[in-house]
Amino acid sequence: MIKVYIGIKRQIIFLAILTLLLMPSTSKALTSQKYPIHLADIWWNCSQLPVEFESLVIAFKLDRQLQEKDFIYIAPLGYAELNSAKIYGGFQTDLMIPDEKSQIKSIDFGKGLIASRWFNSKDSDRIGYAVAEHGSQTVVGDTEGSFVSLRRPTQWKSDAIYEFRLSKNMSVGKESWISLSAVESKSGVITGLGRLKAEGKRIILAKNLASFVEIYSEGIKANKEFKVHFYLPIINGNICKNPIVDVRYSGANIDIAKTTFVEANTDEIIVSVGEEKKNIPKNSLLNLSDYGKTKPTESMSK
């Protein structure tokens, strides 16, 4: 009995040591990150807000090509409040659309456009708040809060200016419909997403207006470098007045977040990713008042 006990005891100790050796180190566990991660949030402070809403245009340009499986989300419309409707949207390298044959899996359609509206609770009628244009799909989900979204595969590219547009489409009773689309500035080609519904016949665009760059899955190489140029918002055909930008960094403990830096240049905000810079501030305020005198292009002011 004694020999059996000693044998079992040694086996338990061996298994315990083996478990400790195979476990990830504490430091590695502490540095693991959950996705999505906002590399930089750009909060636009425009003196004409809040204002009755007719249209909103926020443009961007990417200086280097991003590939599928980079899982980067460039959102000119990172956040906007239209009455009680909280809306966001932009351009993704990997547009995920649920597989019609499966309730669990999603298909990666590669590059595409997306626009979503948040809800405070799981409203069973969320599907009724979106109308997809031909080529787009409507998706309802609860992965990042409750939402309904419009998604459309689109091969957007670098070195082109794209405008993300919202415009009041029509009012029906006590509700209004907001049209969403993307426009390639040089060619004028319009890619429609569809419409999202907001409560109220008279729509007020609130002060809270943002753009962001996000990584939403572990995929992009740590040493990949690119820049996103966000241009000043065009609100009801007028450029953002007396612009002050509040920059917020994620603080995530991954290389791509550590090398994200935001700066101002003329009438734009530049988000640089992957470049080694010293003394990157945690957060910052950038005053673009002197830059806000730049006139919008003919396309962007429509």
Image (cartoon, grey):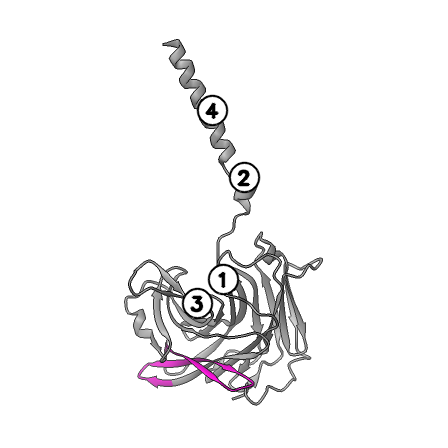
* Front: mark 2 or 1: 1
First-in-chain label (4 vs 3): 4
Distance from label 4 to label 1 (Cα)? 42 Å
- Residue 295, quarter of picture: bottom right
* Element class at badge 4: helix
- Give the image location of residue 187, x and y in percent: 53, 86
- Residue 266, quarter of picture: bottom right
Q: What residue sits right under mark 2 in the picture?
A: 26
Q: What residue sits right under mark 4 in the picture?
A: 14
Residue 276 left/right relative to 11: right
Residue 82 is inside the magenta segment:
no
Magenta: predominant secondary structure element? strand
- Amino acid on which disc 1 is placed: Lys
Residue nearest the observer in this picture, 15 or 256: 15
* Front: mark 4 or 2: 4
- Give the image location of residue 7, x and y in percent: 42, 16
- Amino acid on which disc 4 is placed: Phe
Q: What residue sits right under mark 1 in the picture?
A: 69
- Residue 95 numbered tag: 3
- Name which residue lies at 57% across and 76% down: 60
Distance from label 2 to label 1 (Cα)? 29 Å
Query: Is there a contact, CB below 8 Å, between mark 3 and mark 2?
Result: no
Crowding around mark 4 (Cα neighbors within 10 Å: few <14, some 14 to 19, many 20+) is few
